[in-house]
Amino acid sequence: MNFLGREPYMPPAWCDTLRDPPTTRVHLRTGPSPVHAWRPACIARAAASAGVPCLELWIVRDDMNAGVELSGNKVRQLELLLADAIEKGADCIVTTGAVNSNHCRATAIASRLLGLEPHLVLRVEPAGDSFQDAATQVERCYAGNLFFSHLAGAVVYAGHAKAFAAHGFDKPVQACAENLRTSGRRPYVIPKGGSTRVGVWGYLSAVDELLVHFAGRMPHHIFVAADTAGTTAGLFLGLKLMSEAAEREDVQGEGAICMDSPRGTRAIVHAVTVGANSPAAVRARCAQLAAELGVSIDAADLDTYLRCHDGGREGYARHDPVVAATVAAVAVETGVMLDTTYTAKALMVLTELIASEPDTFAPGRSRVVFWHSGGVLGACGQGEQIFGDAVGELARGGRARVLPLEQLGPGCTATD
């Protein structure tokens, strides 16, 4: 693998009906994301209580796909988006998101790796009402994803949430890009979340990667957190096209498709919406991205391959104590670090669904993949604020302990 090098992009064979695939990609990932069996206690309890003993749960580790500072689901999209930027002669990248955006942090790091200057247009909810309050808050922030964006030397434009409420994200981004063009720069604009017709190919390829991992025995359910819907759209469209290819029996070789679900059932993506976008908005965005690739999507397609769940709880990036407790418990039980904005909420919806709809996971429909999209860096420097109560509860339960070294005896005290 030629890390940071460019190579021709090879679309999955079953994507041959889509138009305008990317021509190149840059290597940002270290290889296929790890996939392994996973059994958090909340899932085990729900399955046992609901009478679903055969539940088979796997986790795709996109949180481990590109090194610590770059990891997460956005890397798959950035491999194609930044290759497109380089092909078009860009010398800087402009993107946007919330102040603690995983996408913006990953874009800033990846841009610097490739010699491009990152410009981030960030939505801030400051304690005060003035626009200066937003800039001051961002300038003094040394936590979360923003801290890593600062370390990468990103040029940050801090905007009050009121401005984004009035104009959306696109107008501020275009204004930033136009300002750069006026000064002689060559910006490449990546919309919020990287959810574009180019970026979505990253998750079409992810479906192919999953197909190879499971040797054609695709899962019956894929659970993933959703906001701007690029990841969801790629998984949804990938399952649809792959299933249709399997029915035509025209995909052969390594990873040949074997849909071993009972007749009449299909693999389905469960998108857990946790951002500003509603389940209806995520469905609409998936259909829109598919249309941009030349595929007409109707309600029947969406109902067959996509199911959206509202997992927002307290809202985007709100630190619900129950969500924090879930993150802490899963880390102790399995060693997997979830985040409070996205993945923990997706796991909670999966747990609730097993309890309320056990027939959904009946024999022959019980192979489940949980897609870990990353995000743990968002909590850096905010541990006490987010997890103080959760870790305290673990300590009271004897699962998180701090002990004095001296109690181990000779050789462990200052007076020895």
Image (cartoon, helix red, strand yellow):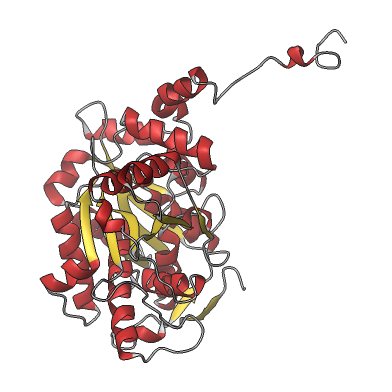
Residue closest to the far top = 415
Q: Find residue 367 and report its horizontal and vertical position in percent.
A: 39, 61
Judge whether residue 236 can be spotted in this image.
yes
The residue sitting at 26% across, 26% down in the picture is 127
Q: Can the viewer see residue 227?
A: no
Nearer to me, 416 or 85? 416
Nearer-the-camera pick, 375 or 104: 375
Work out whether 95 lies above or below 287.
above
The picture quadrant where one finds residue 136 is: top left
The residue sitting at 32% across, 69% down in the picture is: 234
Residue ranking furthest to the right? 416
Is 298 on the left or on the right of 237, as rendered?
left
Horizontal relation, residue 65 to residue 104: left or right: right
249, above or below 193, in the image: below
> Could you say which quadrant of the image residue 282 lies in?
bottom left
User: Could you tell me which quadrant the C terminus lies in?
Assistant: top right
Give the position of the N terminus as an image quadrant. Answer: bottom right
Q: Nearer the viewer, residue 320 or 172?
A: 320
In the displayed structure image, the side of residue 360 where residue 377 appears, left or right: right
Residue drawn at point x = 19 percent, y = 77 percent? 291
**Residue 73 x %, y %:** 41, 58
At 42% across and 41% down in the image, what residue appears?
Answer: 378
- How many numbered markers are drawn? 0
Q: Is residue 210 above or below residue 294?
A: above
Residue placed most toward the observer, 288 or 220: 220
Q: List x then y, in percent, for residue 332.
A: 52, 35
Q: Is residue 35 above or below residue 249?
A: above
Looking at the picture, how far across and down is residue 304, in whole percent? 20, 69
Tell whether 324 sits left or right of 241.
right
